[in-house]
Amino acid sequence: MIDQATIDRILDATQIVDVVSEFVTLRKRGVNYVGLCPFHNEKTPSFSVSPTKGLCKCFSCGKGGNAVHFIMEHEQLSYYEALKYLAKKYNIEIKERELSNEEKQAQNNRESMFIVNSFARNYFQDILINHIDGKSIGMAYFRQRGFRDDTIKKFQLGFSTDARDALAQEGQKKGYRKDFLLKTGLCYERDDHSLSDRFRGRVIFPVHTLSGKVVAFGGRILNADKKIAKYVNSPESEIYHKSNELYGIYFAKQAIVKQDRCFLVEGYTDVISMHQSGVENVVASSGTSLTSGQIRLIHRFTNNITVIYDGDMAGIKASIRGIDMLLEEGMSIKVVLLPDGDDPDSFARKHNATDFQAYITANEVDFIRFKANLLIDEAGKDPMKRAELIADIVKSISVIPEAIVRSVYIRECSQLLRIEEKLLQIEMGKLIEKQNEKTNKSAYNDVPPAYIPEDVVPEEVYQSFIPEEGKEGSEFYEYERLIMSALVRYGEKIMCNMTTEEGKEVPVTVIEYVTNDLKQDELNFHNPLHRKILSEAGMHLKDNNFICERYFIAHPDPFISKLAAELSSDRDQLSKYHTKGQHIVTDDERLHELVPSLMTSFKNAIIEEELKHIMYALQDPENSKSEEKYTAIIKRYMNVQRIRDIMAKRLGDRVVLRK
């Protein structure tokens, strides 16, 4: 466990912009920074980072928090693992007790699998450098590819001997469990339940996450046996999904941001050779067609992609089918065709970074033009094939989100294909219309029944989706959350003075007012985390250095700290208005009005909810069978309605909810 003092030191040292910018390209906008959200697919930046508050938030998907929460979500780490990550980044020493055997056993599968992968990487590296076979076979192969020692070390390359279970035995000897050796795909189980190494007799290429953790391995066989697969990769697992990973992204991300361009190649050695030649903004799709997950990974860092092809026409035609997804993302795509006989690996070994960049600049072409020329050569003079290629190219143009860009491409293709621009426009319009129909239908089908307008579903179906008490969606829950937002941000601040029975004026904080107001009407918050925050805030209020927002954002309970960060990072004020001089009055300037108004609105919403339930009870035929029971319900209804009238008078200038 990490003590609170250490957590505070980590949070004090952490710079939110510094942390987030490792994974997201940020641009300054006013006092904040914005970028594309790393947690969902978007084309317009909605992810905001506030250096003054130390918070980030996506105003589209809602994810965010402080630096710890960001790392937790992005790297799929536990709260304490995220703290360790930041402590390591800022050179802060963490002293914690040794975990017991039971606690070690309770570590979740993801963390254990990353630990096993880390062991395997070190094992493969050691075999490459120190084992006789590693030096004579593995290292000889890397030398033959022209890789320097610093490059081999940088990419953590390794080797596995021909021994059937050498890694399995070493792993179990060091205490790594059999089930994790299997789950990571490092080993597989034979019929007799013994383990075999998956990568035996191969040179090893570790695959890294954005933060540098080893998530998988690729292994290349070095003998010429055609019965054995040339490449073997880690299977899909809890931590590894091939469609979401790009080889080399960890080593390339900073260069991609700096160059504002990403080179896309096919294989491991392509990436490594280009790095060694000085071109570092390069990643590989590892022999698979591009996926939406891989595209989003690139789009976090740049909008510009250059795809580098060798002269293999069959491979080019197979791969360009996936590039439409890049166009759909609104990305700018160029294509470079290398000289015959060269792939990115061999070409990089022949040229330095300057020459490589010069060749790309001189030979890169726009993807649409490249595709059109490629298909024209293939179609020749066959009219049917030409019609097919025109339809194929127009389909690619139709997925581009910007209308102006589409129009430019249509005009260029009209000249290139020698066909009327108007015909291409009509064909593109049909494709866009079909796509819109498909999208709208899908979007409607994805809407939960609770959000379908009341008049389009039967009354009984609509009533079944009325939220239960205390759940998000009910009106009083929205007011409850607004109260908590005010409490977290301004809890320790004095909002007014109250006169005691002795006639003395006593300052009252937001925490004290909310606590006493709830107690007076024998109410409590419905959300248990809200109750816990209010209770803890009351206990620490007498501490001279207590700052509510700071305390709860740094809270050791990750659920509370995440909630506090969300409550603190609301985009707007709770309720802002202009004075006669057009000065925008901030929340903390009018806490004496705002907090009582929120509390009254909260109570009023509870009353409204109570009236709803009473009306349901009055409509229940079972209740009408008993005159005594029915009379009691009517009496309750009259009392609650009277309370509602009183609340309505108190409300005055109601706070308008932002939903």
Image (cartoon, helix red, strand yellow):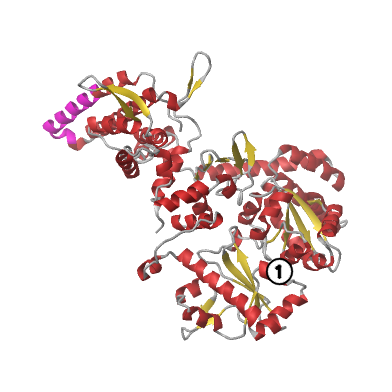
Q: Nearer the viewer, residue 11 or 213?
A: 11
Mark 1 lies on residue: 150
The overriding secondary structure of the stretch rendered in magenta is helix
Above or below, comparing residue 572 to residue 331 in the picture: above
Q: Residues within 10 Å of mark 1 (few under 14, many from 20)?
A: few
Q: Specify whether residue 641 is painted magenta.
A: yes
* Quadrant (top left/top right/bottom left/bottom right) for the N terminus: bottom left
Quick check: 73 left or right of 230? Answer: left
Viewer-side residue, 46 vs 137: 137
Q: Residue at x 49, y 16 (%)?
A: 579
Q: Position of residue 30 (x, y in %)?
A: 61, 33
Can residue 189 be seen in this snapshot?
no
Q: Residue furthest left?
A: 628
Asked if residue 246 shows in the view, the reply is yes
Q: What residue do we see at 65% from left, 78% from top?
A: 128
- Name above or below for residue 393 compared with residue 499: below
Q: Whole-percent x and y of residue 264?
A: 72, 58
Residue 515 relative to residue 337: left or right: left
* Residue type at tag 1: Asp
Residue at image position (41%, 35%) is: 485
Q: Residue at x 55, y 69 (%)?
A: 118
Q: Is residue 593 above or below residue 463?
A: above
In the rendered image, residue 17, in percent from the top left (x then y), is placed at 58, 45
Region rendered in magenta: 623-642
